Amino acid sequence: MRERSHRVAIIGAGVVGCLVAYGLRECPDVEVICIDKGPPENELAGTGLNVGPNSLKILRQFSPELADSLQVEGVSLPWESWVAGITDGTVIFDLPLSQVAENAGIRIRWAELYRQLRQPLGDRIRYNTIALSMGYRDSDRLYLEIENQETGIREAFEDIDLIVGCDGRYSQVRSSFFGGSPTPEHLGVCLYRLLVPQKGGLIADYQQWFYNGSRLLSFAIPGDEVYIAGSFPLDASLEIRDNQKTVEYLRQCYTPPPGLSPVCQFLVDAVCEHLEEIHWARVQDIPIVFGDEGGRVLCLGDASHAMYPTLGQGASQAFEDGCYVGALLRQALQESLVDFPALVARLEQVRRDRITFVRQFSREASDSLLAGSHPVAELQAKTQPAFLAKLRRLYQDTPLLAEALTLG
């Protein structure tokens, strides 16, 4: 502990990095170095996403202004229901989220989400900037060297109190302080995503359609576009073969003997018409890390706990991380003395328990994505009290910021 102003480095200005930086923006004695390798207006940032009710619940406690900005008409659409069934149009369940959540979620474009979260930070983020090196000088001093990729200008910072790794699944912070790149655990599922134009209002709120282990997930977002996330099982090699990236293969993945419903016909046609735009990926998660041994490095979001996307909790847990850590860091850094290792340990204790539950639940909910699955039975199980109780826990049991701050 040292009696002086503090210096915090945030690596990555995605969801969680922006929220932590937002929490610290009014701490006058704290220098915040926030960098991001991308440009300010990242129009290529993903496609679309659904932000869970739990995200909006904790965000409203953290910053009502930010929560309001994300729910403006034209920025997002409400996520209020979850429909799931078979690709022939048979509906297995139609769940209003009001039965399991205290508030709705939202459907939004990634680029718009970034724009809304970054706008209040202004020039506090150094864009197009990468970390060249980082590490410990001694037990309580960190250093960071960065470079602007447009200008080539380098800057070096010493006496950093805390480095917060918010730089995603392939985190440089994690690699630098936690023994290299993590070994992922593969689910055995190929996943792809795209945005396509809406057609006749066929797609509205969140819906999933299955045939054997193949799934089509879709919802509308502002701009009269439809987000589609398709998946199909992989064999034991875990390879996505070239013949699986074809119109013929994809049509047979999703088409049941009775034929496709109009909604699923639209989705399959849209996927096949936009094959060249698809990025193919394998569903995987990585072991959880939070604080390093020195207690002055903290990984958050996908850098800490990239998980199976089945319940859409990747970004939602980034919101929880950012709001909780941003609020507690803000409170701690307003004091003249901060025990950073103790603070990091406290943050980890709360978040690890929550993340462990969410990851396990996401794995359990992935049963209908696997080879040999039985979607009707598995979807029916998701209408039962045991699954719905876990959904309530997922959407409602976020950290209570007011309570956490009073324990400070």
Image (cartoon, rainbow, N blue to C red):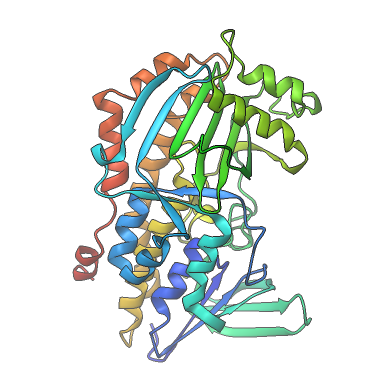
Residue lying at 54% horizontally and 61% vertically, measured from the top left: 112
Q: Quadrant of the C terminus?
A: bottom left
Whether residue 3 sits left or right of residue 288 in the image: it is left
**Residue at the (55%, 16%) spot, across then down:** 212
192 and 70: which is toward the camera = 70
The spot of residue 157 in percent (x, y) is 61, 84
Residue in the foreground of this view, choosing between 217 and 344: 217
Look at the image and tell me whether residue 276 can be seen.
yes
- The residue lying furthest to the front in this view is 200
Task: State left or right for residue 320 relative to residue 178.
Answer: left
**Which residue is at 35% across, 18% downward?**
380
State left or right for residue 351 relative to residue 363. Answer: left
What percent of the width, then of the height, locates residue 377?
A: 40, 14
Q: Is residue 218 above or below residue 372?
A: below
Q: Position of residue 64 (x, y in %)?
A: 31, 68
Whether 11 is drawn above or below 373: the answer is below
**In the rendered view of the protein, which quadrant contains the N terminus?**
bottom left
Picture layout, residue 183 above or below residue 222: above
